[in-house]
Amino acid sequence: VQLQASGGGLVQAGDSLRLSCAASGRSLSNYVVSWFRQAPGKEREFVAAIRRSQGSTYYADSVKGRFSISRDNAKATVSLQMNNLKPEDTAVYYCAADMGTIPSSIRDIRGYDNWGQGTLVTVSS
């Protein structure tokens, strides 16, 4: 599945952004969908995930309480609402999806076969 991430931009600390992940020509309802991010000089890290069936969500400790992942089945997209952004949230954000990701692998980049191209989020202090 081909993924398209969008919604990044330049904001100030404390602002909000909403990222969106869409799949070309199909719904993401049968996929586990996650967001990862990669800051300059750092490894790609898990941010948030949403499962298929009951829509259980998972978050990295660094974003818990500030970020929220959700599905919009009508639009066949998965969104990441980011509130109270901090300079350390600056990174390229990638969405990833897979039909076979198991809960123990949901935070692992190796658990996903499908990746979007990334969208840059820059938070100034």
Image (cartoon, rainbow, N blue to C red):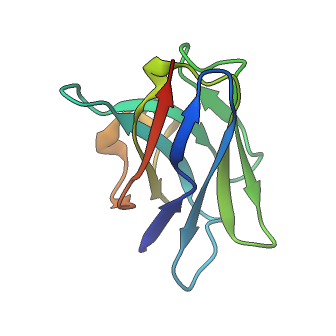
Q: Residue furthest left?
A: 41
Residue 60 is left or right of residue 84, and the answer is left
Q: Residue at x 35, y 61 (%)?
A: 117
Q: Residue at x 46, y 47 (%)?
A: 101
Residue 59 is left or right of residue 56, and the answer is left
Quadrant position of residue 109: top left
Q: Position of residue 92 (x, y in %)?
A: 37, 42
Quadrant position of residue 115: bottom left
Choose between 41 and 74: the one closer to the eye.
Answer: 41
Q: Residue at x 62, y 29 (%)?
A: 58
Choose between 2 and 107: the one closer to the eye.
Answer: 2
Q: Report the quarter where the N terminus lies.
A: bottom left
Q: Position of residue 55 (x, y in %)?
A: 74, 45
82 up-or-down from 5: above or below: above
Residue 20 is left or right of residue 103, and the answer is right
Q: Residue furthest top?
A: 61
Choose between 15 and 75: the one closer to the eye.
Answer: 15
Q: Residue furthest bottom?
A: 25
For the image, the number of numbered tags is 0
Q: Position of residue 120 (x, y in %)?
A: 41, 47
Choose between 11 and 35: the one closer to the eye.
Answer: 11
Q: Position of residue 111 (x, y in %)?
A: 36, 44
66 up-or-down from 62: above or below: below
